[in-house]
Amino acid sequence: MNQIIDISLLGLAGGYLLMIFPVAIILYLQVGMMKETAVAVLRMTVQLLFVGLYLQVVFKLNNPFLNLAWVAAMILVADLSILKGCRLKLKRFLLPMFTALVVGTVLPMIFFAGIILRLPGWFEAQYVIPLAGMILGNCLRADIIGLNSFYQSIHKNEKAYHQSLAYGAALTEAVNPFFRDALRSALAPTIASMATIGLVSLPGMMTGVILAGADPFTAIKYQIAIMIAIFSGTAITVFLAIRLTVANSFNAFGILHPDILRDS
Amino acid sequence: MISNDSETVVDLNRLHLYFDGQPVLKDLSLGVFHGDKVTLTGPSGSGKSTVLRCILGLVMPDSGTITILGEPVTRHNIWQKRRHIAYVAQEPDLGTGSVKEVIEIPFSYRANAGMRDNLARLPEIMERFNLPQPLLDKQITRLSGGEKQRIALSIAILLARPIVLLDEASSALDAENKQAVADYFKQAQNTTVLSVAHDSEWLGFATRVVDMKEIQKT
């Protein structure tokens, strides 16, 4: 297998020149996104620079505990950004959400590392960190969709929800229709991308494996395995996130705490 | 009115409720006796619907006690108490799905497991309220306000609860159907009905009409 060609710093600096086109278009149409664009490009550069440096160290040491700490840090940051993204109050949700993300990421990861890859060490940084990152990223997206959908639609359909309580429904029976809808909308994007993968675009991971010099067939095996891991991770996370937050989100009479939703 | 505690089915004692600092219920007390058909009247915004929602534990009064079938309602027994009550909301929102599915959902709850056989009476009840059978296959969201009200009333009746709470439950019905509903509850001697009404026709089956002003301190 041929090694991947490294990008020289000068080469990368040249890459930034590509920004000329979007900047020109933004200025020409007076879209007014210059500041956001500049901040975003700067943030991307700085954040990735740090991750790159850090991962170099992590990979070199390849210490299981350090790797675990890295994954835990990723999950914590994900946790916080979910709560920011879904307009829900923070403190009630922090612990259940953390648990949901940990289980949703770690369980498929154990499968991936132990059964699919049969890694020699139980926590090889080179494999575990990027794979866990991909699973986590998708769990995060699904979780935002799922939790938002669940709590917003109970709030929006308050009358129907109250009616089912009045009909004698237990809390689980009353929230179940909303639970089903939330899970459906959280899983739909992954199902859609599994159904069209390879036809519309080449997925990022497969591209990466091919660039790294691997055989395309190796690349698709990785891609299939990661898609399944992502799907199972998202299902686990959304299920647990809703299940675990329900206990704290309703009062003893089954009424949604009004302070769950941030602005409504 | 002679008060007989053993016969009091719903007893509201000195309820106070504030919403955004504004009083909604001011020292409200009301006793409803077994088999009573009580109708609450008062202008809109006078808290009539809120009284029903308090009884169901959907709204918590700031003070006062609610006693249902001889026991004060608490956070522990509210789920049990709801099994004795049927509630028809104003402009009922019954969720989504076909009418048939919507009718069957409450009977799928564990609390109503013993009531499933009552669904056999559905055709009879529907006929009584002038609802044609083909309606069952329609989507509930496509029904008119009056049709939805009669479906909600049918569910309430099939659940065979001793207490029925009606929140302007016949407001969208024509005179004939209003009469059909009134006739039904008039003959249901063992059913205690607390209703809320705006219009005079609904009062047809009431054994007692209570003005919101009478039962509160002003």
Image (tube, helix red, strand yellow):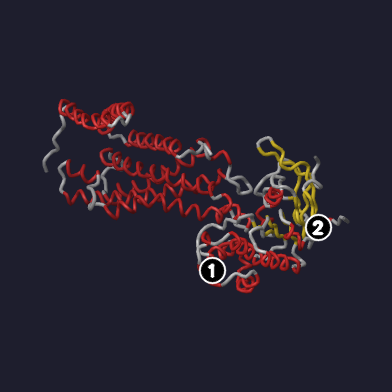
Q: Which mark is residue B136?
A: 1
| Residue at x 16%, y 45% (from the top left corner) | A214
Q: Position of residue A7 (x, y in %)?
A: 16, 31
In front here: B151 or A116? Answer: B151
Q: Is residue B105 visible?
A: yes
Asked if disc 2 and disc 1 are in contact, CB closer than 8 Å, the reply is no
Q: Position of residue A128 (x, y in %)?
A: 30, 41
- Are there few (<14), some (14-19), or many (20+) residues within 10 Å of tag 2? some
Instruction: Give the residue type that dot 1 points to.
Output: Leu
- Rendered-image quadrant of the C terminus of chain B: top right
- Rendered-image quadrant of the N terminus of chain B: bottom right
Q: What secondary structure is marked by label 1?
A: helix
Left or right of B97 on screen, residue A250: right
Q: Position of residue A146 (x, y in %)?
A: 44, 47
Find the distance from the CA under tag 2 to the CA under tag 1.
35 Å
As drawn, B169 above or below A206: below
> In terms of image quadrants, where is residue A207?
top left
Instruction: Give the residue type that dot 2 points to.
Output: Arg
In front here: B174 or A137? Answer: B174
Pointer 2 chain: B
As drawn, B165 above or below A145: below
Q: Which mark is residue B159?
A: none
Q: Position of residue A130 (x, y in %)?
A: 28, 40
Q: What secondary structure is marked by label 2?
A: strand
Q: Is residue A60 visible?
A: no
As drawn, A118 above or below B173: above
In front here: B11 or A219? Answer: B11
| Residue at x 77%, y 48% (from the top left corner) | B212
As drawn, A89 above or below B31: above
**Residue that extends furthest to the right in the rendered view of this protein:** B2
